[in-house]
Image: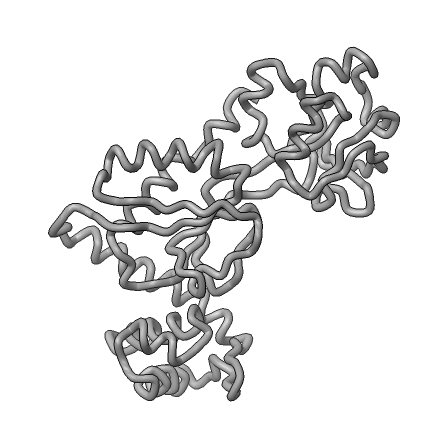
Amino acid sequence: MKSRLAGMNVFAEVVGAKSFSAAADKLGISKSLASREVSALERSLAVKLLNRSTRKLSLTEAGSIFYEHCVNILHEAELAERRVTQAQSEPAGVVKMTAIPAFAVRHVLPAIVEFQQQYPKIQVRLSCSNRTVDLGAEGFDLGIRSSPPAPNLVARKLAVSRLVLLASPAYLAQRGTPRRIEDVEKHDCVLFPMLAPKGIWTFRRSGQKYAVKVPASFETDDLEAVRAAILSGLGVGLLPRHMVGADVRQGALVPLLRQFQPVPEGGIYLVYLPNRTQPSRVRVLIDFLIARFGPVPPWEEGW
C-alpha cells in the first residue's frame, strides 16, 4: 500500500504539472524515476492512465477517474499526518494569491487583515485579476475564482454566489417599479454579457424557468462598471449578492422581484495545485478562508 501511495503521489504531481520533468523537479527525483513510478502504477492497476506523446500528456478516461480519487486520498493522508504531528514552528513566509477583483476588495482584503493579525509572520501578496491564471506557471499558491476550476486543480467551494435584480431609487422613481417578470422587458437594462447570453435573462420560480428578452441601455464586460451604472440610474441590472450587500443595506440599491431567482447560481471557489508537501503558511490560510466564508457567507444573511 505504501508503494501504491507513492505512485499515486507521483501520478498526481505529473498531472498537475502537465509534465514528467516539472513533476520530477518538484518531487526532487529524476524524470526516469517519475516515469517508472507511473508505469508501475499502471501495471498494478492493469489500465492505462496517461496518453504520452513527445509534445504533451493527457489523461485517459480511466486516468481522469483515478486522478480525482487520487487527489482526495492524498489530501486525506496529508490531513491525517497534519493532525497527529505538532507544528515545530509558527508558520511564516510569503503566500502568493490571486482573486477576482469584485470579490477581493470587499471580502478577501478584510479577511487577510484578520488573518495577518493571527499569523503576523505570514505575508500575503494578492493579485486581482479576472483572467484565467495558470497557478503553477505564474507561481501562485492559491486562487479564488467564480467558475469551476480546471481538473488539474484542487477546488474547495468557499460559498454560493447568487444573483439579484436591482435598480437605484432614483431610476425607480422616474420609471416605476416592475411588479411582474414581464415588466422587465419595458425597462432600461444594464447588461453584463456573460449573464445575458443573446440578450436574455433567465429566472427561476417554483421550479419553473422564465426567459426575459431585455433591451440593453448600457452594456459592459466589467461587473464594477455594471454596479456603477445601476447606481447612477442607467437602468435595472443583475449583480452577485456579494457585491451589493452594503448598497442594499444603505438604500442605494433596491432588490426587485425577489420571488424570482436569477440563474445561473454560481459559486466562489478556492483553488490550488495538488501539492502533497504544501507549506504550513499555505495550509493555515486555506483553513482560515474556508472557516471565514462558510457555511453561510456574511453577504447571504438577511436576504
The quarter of the image holding the C terminus is top right
Asked if residue 294 can be seen in this view, the reply is no
Residue 265 spot, x, y in % from top left: 62, 40
Q: Is residue 165 left or right of residue 103?
A: right
196 shown above or below 190: below
Q: Quadrant of residue 123?
A: top left
Please give the count of numbered marks on the rendered protein: 0
Taking the spot 55% from the left edge, 46% from the top edge, the residue there is: 146
Q: Quadrant of residue 7?
A: bottom left
Residue 17 spot, x, y in % from top left: 42, 71
The quarter of the image holding the N terminus is bottom left
Taking the spot 54% from the left edge, 32% from the top edge, the residue there is: 242
Residue 47 spot, x, y in % from top left: 46, 83
Residue 53 spot, x, y in % from top left: 52, 87
Taking the spot 69% from the left edge, 32% from the top edge, the residue there is: 238
Query: Could you say which is closer to the camera, residue 68 or residue 33?
Result: 33
Q: Is residue 147 left or right of residue 94?
A: right
Q: How is the image coloured?
A: one colour
164 shown above or below 94: above
